Image (cartoon, rainbow, N blue to C red):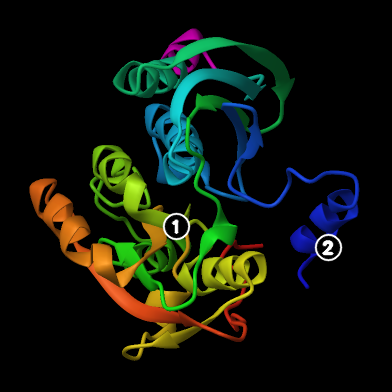
């Protein structure tokens, strides 16, 4: 068990809500993600506008994966003392652009002075049918959207001092909200791929008490690539054609790679965050 999982486990005995991308309380879902300098990014990799956008998008991704529509956001931002008014406007513009795109109202938070840029975003979303990690049924198909592996490759390039395209998913995650909301009635379990496909499969395996029979080999470069923010979900084989039709409509690539079986799945990937 890694330290993150160990720490979270300390609270599980006192809460029946912890264990998904967000906490379900009635019709509302509360999700929170940190985006800290020198943990999740280095300052010279992103513009301030891009940093704010990604901090918002990675949190909105959690809401989408639970079939919830974001309504409100709370921002906690630790701002370096040497930032100018121009810097702070650039940072604010990123938050505001994403909020406008997803019809989110920023309703408050906190700001403090710091030696580096640290951001924590809380998204409050609403849903009538939350989709959890625990809903996988026997013989369900497992599927992920898009292509995996590019974010791990781009992160390695950045760590080696190279440059990557501004269109990289590592810079700005490409969320698939309209597609997922439309197929949600067919989905039994879901989450987004933030820590890598294999890590997320282990989490779904624990919550759903299922193993997975893979249809084909998936390399570690694909299965261990974090920061992808593609959707991972399960559904009944009888709904495959309906889901594929919606995917074609929204130009979303589907990868149906496994079937749910009895057993359990464990990832052997290393944590993708750097030291």
Rendered location of residue 71, percent (x, y)? 47, 18
Above or below, 188 against 90 in this view is below
Range of residues picked out in magenta: 83-89
Classify mark 2: helix, strand or loop: helix
Report which residue position mark 1 lands on. Answer: 188
Above or below, 127 against 141 in this view is above
Mark 2: few, some, or many residues within 10 Å (few <14, many ≥20)? few
- Identity of the residue furthest to the front in this view: 238
Residue 200 in sight from this viewpoint: yes
Left or right of 275 on screen, residue 150:
left
Image point (64%, 27%), residue name: 26
Image point (41%, 67%), residue name: 152
Q: Earlier in the sequence, mark 2 or mark 1?
A: 2
Assign the magenta stretch its main secondary structure.
helix
Disc number lying in front (2 or 1): 1
- The CA span between labels 2 and 1 is 27 Å
Rendered location of residue 258, percent (x, y)? 38, 80
Task: Pick the quarter of the image with the N terminus.
Answer: bottom right
Residue 192 in sight from this viewpoint: no
Camera-nearest residue between 148 and 68: 68
Camera-nearest residue between 264 and 34: 264
Report which residue position mark 2 lands on. Answer: 6
Left or right of 35 on screen, residue 217:
left
Camera-nearest residue between 216 and 137: 137
Rendered location of residue 251, percent (x, y)? 12, 51
Q: Which corner quadrant of the image does residue 160 belong to?
A: bottom left
């Amino acid at each position: 068990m890694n330290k993150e999982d160990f720490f979270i486990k300390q609270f599980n005995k006192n809460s029946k809500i912890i264990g998904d991308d967000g906490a379900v309380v009635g019709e509302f879902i509360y999700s929170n993600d940190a985006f800290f300098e020198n943990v999740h990014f280095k300052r010279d990799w992103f513009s301030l506008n891009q940093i704010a956008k990604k901090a918002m998008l990675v949190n909105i991704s959690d809401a989408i994966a639970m079939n919830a529509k974001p309504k409100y956001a709370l921002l906690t931002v630790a701002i370096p003392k040497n930032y100018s008014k121009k810097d702070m406007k650039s940072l604010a513009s990123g938050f505001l652009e994403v909020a406008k795109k997803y019809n989110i109202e920023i309703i408050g938070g906190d700001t403090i002075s710091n030696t580096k840029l640290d951001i924590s975003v809380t998204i409050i979303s609403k849903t009538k049918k939350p989709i959890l990690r625990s809903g996988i049924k026997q013989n369900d198909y497992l599927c992920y959207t898009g292509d995996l592996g590019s974010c791990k490759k781009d992160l390695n390039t950045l760590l080696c001092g190279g440059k990557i395209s501004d269109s990289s998913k590592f810079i700005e995650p490409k969320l698939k909200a309209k597609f997922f909301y439309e197929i949600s009635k067919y989905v039994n379990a879901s989450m987004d791929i933030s820590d890598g496909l294999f890590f997320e499969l282990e989490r779904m395996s624990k919550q759903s008490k299922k193993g997975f029979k893979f249809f084909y080999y998936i390399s570690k470069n694909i299965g261990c690539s974090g920061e992808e923010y593609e959707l991972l979900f399960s559904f009944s084989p009888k709904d495959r054609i309906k889901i594929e039709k919606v995917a074609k409509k929204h130009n979303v690539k589907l990868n149906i790679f496994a079937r749910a079986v009895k057993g359990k799945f464990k990832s052997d990937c290393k944590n993708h965050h750097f030291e």
